[in-house]
Image (spheres, grey):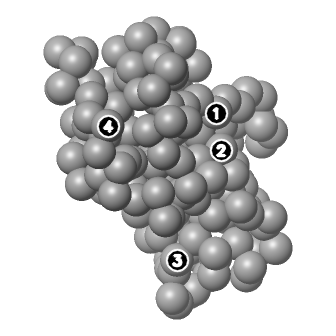
Amino acid sequence: MARFAAIDFETANYSRDSACAVGLVVVSGKRIVDRAYHLIRPPSSEFFFTHIHGLTWADVRSAPTFAELWPELRAQLAGVDFLAAHNASFDRSVLSGCCTSYGLRVPPGRFVCTVQVARKVWSIFPTKLPEVCRHLRIPLQHHRADSDAEACARIVMAASAAGWNP
């Protein structure tokens, strides 16, 4: 199995640079070798999605900005063959939005979407993360970025064990 990282962002509002939390899980040699969870102070104090993830401006106002956190995240992502995320277009757009907002180089590389993986490998519909996790018996605290990232990592690991190749 390739070395990969699963990533999940929670956002404060509709702006793609409004990441307020990130979960990251790195897999190498068929096992989880690193994991991280960080709160992020977005550029704006406007929070529209507290009802989804439970985070507020008070939770993140003292957290590092994405730019301050980026060197650590970039180091954890070094050497991965791909990033995995559930509904990868969202997480890719948040990563890109945050990098662009702070004048950082958007990391090259491909994203694997675990929605598509679950549909292709197991024909799971609907393919929301809780349904896929229930089907695969993966524990999940949905909308907690580290739990969502770990679930995505485990989906990729299970798919690989079932013969899927990234």
Type of amino acid at the residue the image marks with label 2: Asp
The alpha-carbon separation of the residues under discs 1 and 3 comes to 22 Å
Left or right placement of residue 1 versus residue 84 in this view: right
What amino acid type should be assigned to the residue bearing mark 4?
Answer: Ser
- Of labels 1 and 4, earlier in sequence is 1
Q: What residue type is labelled 3?
A: Lys
Q: Which of 5 and 42 is in front in this view?
A: 42
Q: In this view, does 161 lie above or below 78?
A: below
Q: Distance between the residues labelled 3 and 4?
A: 29 Å
Viewer-nearest of discs 1 and 4 = 4
SS at badge 2: helix
Do the numbered discs 2 and 1 sit on residues whose CB atoms are within 8 Å? yes
Q: Where is residue 35 in the image (x, y as percent from the top left)?
A: 71, 31
Tag 1 near tag 4, CB within 8 Å:
no
Do residues under tags 1 and 3 come within 8 Å of each other at their CB atoms? no
In the picture, the disc for residue 128 is 3
